[in-house]
Amino acid sequence: MIKKLIDFIKIFFTDPRWQKVRAVFWFCLITVLIHFSWRFWAINLHYFPIKSGMIIIFDFLVNQVYDQSLWVIKNIFSIKVESVANAMFCENGAGIMVVESCSGVKQIMQFAILMLIFPGPWKHKLWYIPLGMFIVHLTNIFRISMLVVVAKHSPENIEYAHDNWLRIMFYVVIFILWLIWVEKIADKKTQMANGH
């Protein structure tokens, strides 16, 4: 049994037929490692040694996310909300508050670190990483805006939406961006050589 497992592991990491599955495996492993490393850094080390810089980044992005989401909610979704500090309340009294964990900093950094780790030409990384970070930011604005839509129409489901499908959406977007990188940008020379 152990020998079969060892043989499978050898095949998995060397056989070219498993190349795409290996790439997804590395994506998942790196994403999980970044997630738990970030949590440890935030909770146990309080962003040491750049805590003051992180506070500035969080404050800036919280304000940006709040203002931009508020604009989307009012001008695109046409939802009336009362704006108090960093909170938005619907006419039914349900609302949300945009705090540090809503800033998107972790997800933006997850994407950037992932792209820095994965192979590919630096001339493309120089434009793709900032573009991807911006797309992750837009995803966050959509996420906050959708939370307000849920608050208006189904306030009892705010927590469920926040903790489940709207959180998963971040990782789906990051996965799609990574997939585009791996399939269309980073490996272009190999694809051309293979006639794809």
Image (cartoon, rainbow, N blue to C red):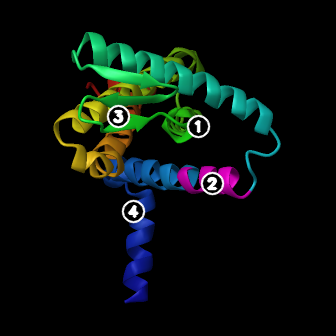
Q: Which residue is mark 2?
A: 37
What residue did someone put label 3 on?
173
Looking at the rendered structure, the kind of residue marked 1 is: Ile
Q: Name the residue nearer the viewer: 73 or 177.
A: 73
Q: Main secondary structure of the magenta part?
A: helix
Q: CA distance from mark 4 to mark 1?
A: 25 Å
Magenta-drawn segment: 35-44
> What element does badge 3 sit on?
helix
Residue at (57%, 49%) from the top-left corner? 34
With respect to residue 91, does 18 lie above or below? below
Mark 3 belongs to which amino acid? Val
Q: Residues within 10 Å of mark 4 (few under 14, many from 20)?
A: some
N-terminal-most mark, 2 or 4: 4
Q: Which quadrant of the figure contains the C terminus? A: top left
Q: Is residue 42 magenta?
A: yes
- Counting from the top left corner in percent of width and height, residue 167 is at 36, 44
Q: Is residue 47 one of those drawn in magenta?
A: no
| Residue 83 point in image, percent of width and height | 42, 22
